Amino acid sequence: MYKVLIIDDEEPLREAIRILGDWKGLGVDEVLEATDGKMGLEMIANHSIDLVMVDMKMPGMSGAELLQVLEQDYPDLPAIVISGYNDFEYTRQAIRSKVVDYLLKPINRLDLNAALRKAVDLLEARRVRESEFINRNITLNMSLPKLKEKMYLSIIDRSFRSQTNEAFLPLIGADDPDNRFAVVVLRMLNMEKIRKARFHSDVDLLHFAVGNMLNEIAGEYFQAFSFASPKLDRELIVILTMKGAYQEDIAYRSLHQMNKALAALQDLLGIVAVAGIGTPCESIMEIASSYETAKAAINGIDLLKLKGYFVANAVTKSANEGYPVTGRMQMFRAALESGNTAGAKSILSEELRKWGGADLFTLGDADQSLSRFIILMNDMSLELGVPRDKLPLMEEHPVRFMGLSDDFASYEQFSRLLEDALHFYLEQIRLTLSANRPFEIGDIKAYIDNRYYEDIKISMFADKYFLSREYIMKLFKQQFGCGIHEYVQRIRMDKAKELLDDPSLKIQDISEMLGYKDKNYFSKAFRNYFSISPTEYRTAGKEG
């Protein structure tokens, strides 16, 4: 769609052009107006005009002067000249300015639309040429690294078609039968920390720096090409190419060079990384399998034994089965619904202790555990009423959504990450339930009145109502004139007197009925409260 500007000081003429123009048929969606040349230039500067219609005789800046400015500042802007004077000077300027057409007043529908059609055809032809030029330049001038990256990724995801891309195969050494290949997957374990501390949060710059170092160090023996993984931004994929080598030689050299590269990354940039080396292959089309074994090698690294950088070229299968708290989600939910945050944390801590005491817990186990934990907690949070926009999406960066870093280079750091993630969900659930669960301080009093014999702690109410201990204690005292512990004591002592009046009940039985496990402790509490022992109270009652 096009935008046309009419520049004319006569309102009737502007209106006539508006009425007579076949704007819809010409693909014009907006017609603007300016009353003089100066205003017209301002609108051209601010409104992305595609075509101007200029009256040659206007007060102030004339049409001829305006065309001169347009010729210099907007040489590609087509113009249609309108004039009431068949004057040679006007015509000469119009020819010099290469206007699309020259219309004489009064304007008629046929001439106007013919001129407009000529201008629109010119615009469309120019747009086609520009599009072809851009596409041609994209094809010819596409960055070679980007083209190679695209080819490698298409081979890795098995979408590459040799016949279609045959002309590009020499770019990645696929035309040389002596070339041998291997894929390395590198994973930065402290990427978030380094990205913020040394690269001003610029992930692309971090990838560029790491890729350059890998290519340079590996390049002593290989042609190395590195690029960021499209699936996980803390991972880089490195394609190693070596000419005329045996598979054993490639395996040995790649292990040596990657150890050297990871040591340099840690020394120079502070990056702690691990790498998995894939099975060497003779054909470029086999690097998909090499990539898969490289990923499996990284996933098989034992997190329990990881100390600093590490290179793996063998796959270890974990003996770990299941994932966080899956079999205990009902307990988890019950704890969360009742406000028992300590119970929820205890369930997770028990699982973490179990994995930490296992013979093996791999990076793959950690990734899977974290991912499934987030999915389960997302589902549970939604069921408990937490709004969806308060929860992370798995296809993005769920941990970063929580305001956490997904860095972990040890089992201890992984454990803290899971604990911090749980804290995030507990807070979202707390906010939701506290908004939906009405609180009355009288509920606590009623609970004590009916269940005075239990081991009552203020923390139970704090967890249940998602309020602080201090706030509950202050509110209770304001409402009932005493603290919660004092009130529990008062209720128990009043009940104790009532029970002692029944001679059939032993003091030991009364002690247990009031929640005291020890008869002596009950007697001491009774004496402190009434300045008389339970036995003395009962004796005095008989005498009275």
Image: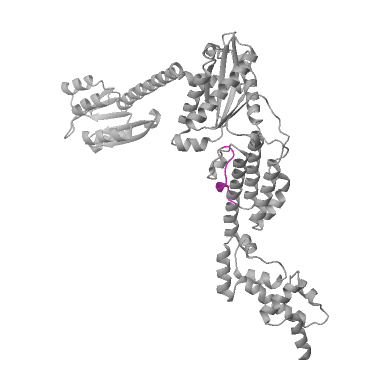
**Residue at screen point 53% across, 24% down:** 261
Q: Position of residue 489 (x, y in %)?
A: 67, 74
Closer to us: 293 or 98: 293
In this rendering, the answer to whether 82 lies above or below 96 is: below
> Magenta span: helix, strand or loop, mainly?
loop
Residue 15 in the magenta stretch? The answer is no
In this rendering, the answer to whether 350 lies above or below 360 is: below
Q: Left of 535 or right of it: where is 100?
A: left
**Residue at screen point 55% across, 69% down:** 474
In this rendering, the answer to whether 11 lies above or below 135 is: below
Q: Position of residue 541 (x, y in %)?
A: 76, 87
The answer to whether residue 36 is visible is no
Q: Left of 435 or right of it: where is 203?
A: left
Q: Position of residue 18 (x, y in %)?
A: 31, 35
Q: Left of 121 or right of it: where is 225?
A: right
The answer to whether residue 320 is visible is yes
Q: Position of residue 71 (x, y in %)?
A: 24, 24
Q: Which residues are magenta?
A: 386-395
**The C terminus is located in which quarter?**
bottom right
Q: Quadrant of residue 74?
A: top left
Closer to us: 419 or 272: 272
